[in-house]
Image (cartoon, grey):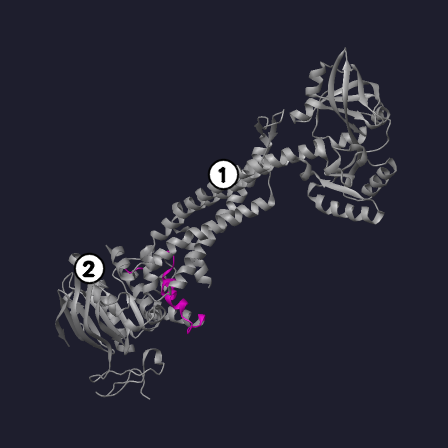
């Protein structure tokens, strides 16, 4: 039985569905299996004359282990697409499959579980819990996972906080950290759960160029070490240049899907 | 779990001003319930004790059928002196009976200076009656005493009608069982105020031996019991009933609350009014708490959406928020209980001057009773109100779409 990270032949049927629960992944893949498959996704807000279409038939595939930049001007639909892939929102039409499972078919419970176990989120505004220390922020989502013991959680927190270079600031609360440090805590929180897919919405928007680059390099190195798939939205040309694949959006459509 | 509880506790204190407002709302509401309840309880207790220690005692014992028939045929329902002695002995054998004494009601005329004033006589055993009349104020003179067998006490209104002064000689005239009139000379030894106008206007307290002499009858109308505690009435009543059955005494027993018509009317009328007031206070408390808790949740919509985006189940977020509400509720209710008890003690030390209640002749100085069951109820109501008022904002927060909440927060 192939391991998760193993590359599959073009027509291989993956037996590793979400959480390895012997679900059959029925879509075929090119070279490596696709982790995310987006098919003709539309997202419209409001109804009638006030309706506003954010996405107009997006179709794309993201391979397992890819480092993907989602580029495009403001209002092109980057955040909307990230929210849909992250199961924070649902498409008006079309479908999104992650690890072979259609998100639209999942219950609220399954979606929460999916976000908790399979996804890591990095928010533009970091969204750290203000009353928790850096270490506690990293540990927080893992508290709700039954598959991790307290010891495992602590080990992961210790390892992640060292990895992001905040070992000496682990007890500091977010308001005692700089913007770059907060983003590193947010990144550590997203990665500590060892998700297969990390979604980052303009993770460097509030950081200076150097700090932003550092954050992306951290994501890149993690991507290479753990074969974790990253999908991040950005305007920064240097960050776009670091990606394996660039999805260029404009006015709710994929203008370019370049490897 | 430790971090979960720690997070809840830290969230409670994250916005100190908001938390202080919420705690104050809960504490003030809890204290208001305790003080309001304590005032009502105090008023009712005063009235109750007035009824018990002014007129009725805790328990009255009569011959079977007395209540239904004594107005038509009073003579039929009198207890012989031998039976009365047995009843008193049985009652005094009960450790919770403080006093057991005979009483007899009769009526007649007071003749003084060619004036005749009707009266309602209560024949009492002088020493025992002093204990049973602790809430009766002696306005002038001396209490009844065996040393002065012909001394009588007149109610304030009756004394006014007689224009009587302490030491005045009075002639009591009444009809005996035979129908013949009899009279006795007595001396006005004191003037009392029982608090109930009707009672004070007509009542003359006469030593039992004088009455027996006047009526030429040794029989007793009722035995009055005073207990160590009012809440012991049901138990003592049951014990007395059982003792009388054992002894073959066919008697009727009535408790103070069956006799105190005025008390029952006041409690019924004001109980409803004050109960309604309590509902209004409760509603204000719930609204104030709801507002404070609701605002603290609304402020955190983005954070709550972040939790859910990270995969925390809505159920867990609800649990966290309700844990926070529970902590705020516990702290607020504890603070409110302490505040309420403190205010109660302070107000009781100063005293609240009340005017005379309806039907009463004297104003009284009230206080705020600290009733443990009321404090517990106020604590529980405040805690429940906090939890209840958190439910709607929590439910609303959980229904907000995650993506748009995060987007709105980012703007």
- Where residue B38 appears, as percent x and y from the top left, is 57, 39
Q: How far apart in space, not on screen, are marks 1 and 2 (Cα)?
A: 49 Å
Q: Determine the residue positioned at 26% across, 59% down.
A: B404
Is A141 included in the stretch rendered in magenta? Answer: yes
- Where residue B346 appears, as percent x and y from the top left, is 57, 34
- Where residue A45 appears, as percent x and y from the top left, is 20, 61
Report whether residue A132 is seen: yes
Q: Which mark is residue B173?
A: none
B313 w.r.t. B156: above or below: below
Q: Residue furthest right?
A: B82
Mark 1 surroundings within 10 Å by alpha-carbon count, few (fewer than 14), some (14 through 19), many (20 or more): few
For the record, the magenta segment spans A125-150
Which corner quadrant of the image does residue A205 belong to? bottom left
Identify the element where label 1 is drawn: helix
Which residue does the numbered mark 2 point to in the structure image? A47
Which corner quadrant of the image does residue B4 belong to? bottom left
Which residue does the numbered mark 1 point to in the structure image? B277
Q: Mark 1, chain letter?
A: B
Report whether residue A164 is seen: no
B362 w.r.t. A187: above or below: above
Q: Determine the residue positioned at 41% across, 53% down.
A: B390
Number of labels in the image equals 2
Identify the element where label 2 is drawn: loop
Q: Is residue B234 left or right of residue B282?
A: right
């Amino acid at each position: 039985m192939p391991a998760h990270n193993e590359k599959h032949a073009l027509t291989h049927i993956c037996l590793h569905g979400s959480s390895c629960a012997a679900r059959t992944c029925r879509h075929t893949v090119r070279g490596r299996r696709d982790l995310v498959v987006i098919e003709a996704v539309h997202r419209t807000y409001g109804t009638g004359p006030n309706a506003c279409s954010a996405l107009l038939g997006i179709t794309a595939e993201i391979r397992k282990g890819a480092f993907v930049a989602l580029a495009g001007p403001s209002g092109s639909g980057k955040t909307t697409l990230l929210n849909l892939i992250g199961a924070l929102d649902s498409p008006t039409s079309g479908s999104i499959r992650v690890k072979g499972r259609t998100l639209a078919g999942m219950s609220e419970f399954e979606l929460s579980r999916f976000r908790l176990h399979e996804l890591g989120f990095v928010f533009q505004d970091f969204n750290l819990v203000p009353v928790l220390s850096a270490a506690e922020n990293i540990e927080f989502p893992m508290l709700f996972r039954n598959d991790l013991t307290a010891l495992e959680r602590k080990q992961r927190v210790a390892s992640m906080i060292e990895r992001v270079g905040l070992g000496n600031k682990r007890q500091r609360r977010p308001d005692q950290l700089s913007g770059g440090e907060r983003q590193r805590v947010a990144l550590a929180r997203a990665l500590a759960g060892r998700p297969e897919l990390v979604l980052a919405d303009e993770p460097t928007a509030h950081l200076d160029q150097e700090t932003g680059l550092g954050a992306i390099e951290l994501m890149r190195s993690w991507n290479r070490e753990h074969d974790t798939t990253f999908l991040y939205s950005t305007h920064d040309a240097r960050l776009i240049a670091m990606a394996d694949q660039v999805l260029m959006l404009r006015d709710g459509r994929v203008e370019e899907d370049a490897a | 779990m430790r971090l979960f509880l720690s997070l809840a506790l830290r969230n409670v204190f994250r916005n100190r001003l908001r938390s202080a407002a919420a705690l104050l709302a809960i504490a003030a509401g809890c204290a208001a319930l305790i003080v309001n309840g304590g005032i009502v309880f105090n008023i009712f207790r005063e009235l109750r004790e007035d009824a018990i220690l002014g007129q009725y005692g805790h328990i009255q014992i009569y011959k079977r059928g007395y209540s239904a028939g004594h107005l038509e045929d009073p003579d039929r329902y009198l207890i012989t002196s031998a039976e009365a002695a047995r009843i008193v002995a049985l009652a005094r054998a009960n450790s919770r009976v403080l006093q057991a004494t005979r009483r007899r009601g009769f009526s007649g005329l007071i003749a003084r200076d060619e004036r005749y004033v009707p009266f309602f006589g209560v024949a009492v055993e002088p020493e025992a009656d002093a204990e049973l009349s602790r809430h009766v104020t002696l306005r002038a003179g001396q209490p009844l005493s065996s040393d002065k067998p012909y001394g009588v006490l007149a109610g304030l209104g009756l004394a006014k009608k007689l224009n009587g002064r302490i030491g005045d000689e009075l002639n009591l005239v009444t009809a005996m069982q035979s129908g013949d009139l009899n009279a006795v000379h007595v001396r006005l030894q004191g003037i009392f105020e029982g608090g109930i106008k009707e009672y004070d206007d007509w009542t003359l307290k006469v030593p039992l031996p004088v009455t027996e002499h006047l009526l030429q009858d040794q029989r007793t109308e009722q035995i009055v019991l005073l207990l160590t505690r009012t809440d012991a009435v049901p138990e003592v009543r049951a014990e007395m009933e059982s003792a009388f059955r054992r002894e073959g005494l066919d008697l009727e027993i009535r408790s103070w609350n069956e006799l105190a018509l005025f008390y029952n009317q006041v409690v019924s009328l004001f109980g409803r009014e004050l109960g309604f007031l309590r509902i209004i206070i409760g509603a204000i408390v719930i609204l104030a708490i709801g507002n404070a808790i609701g605002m603290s949740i609304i402020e955190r919509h983005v954070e709550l959406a972040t939790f859910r985006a990270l995969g925390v189940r809505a159920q867990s977020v609800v649990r966290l928020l309700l844990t926070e509400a529970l902590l705020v509720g516990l702290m607020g209710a504890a603070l409110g209980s302490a505040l309420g008890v403190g205010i109660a003690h302070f107000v009781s030390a100063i005293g609240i001057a009340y005017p005379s209640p309806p039907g009463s002749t004297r104003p009284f100085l009230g206080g705020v009773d600290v009733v443990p069951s009321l404090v517990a109820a106020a604590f529980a109501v405040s805690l429940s109100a906090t939890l209840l008022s958190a439910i709607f904002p929590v439910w609303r927060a959980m229904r907000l779409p995650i993506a748009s909440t995060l987007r709105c927060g980012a703007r």
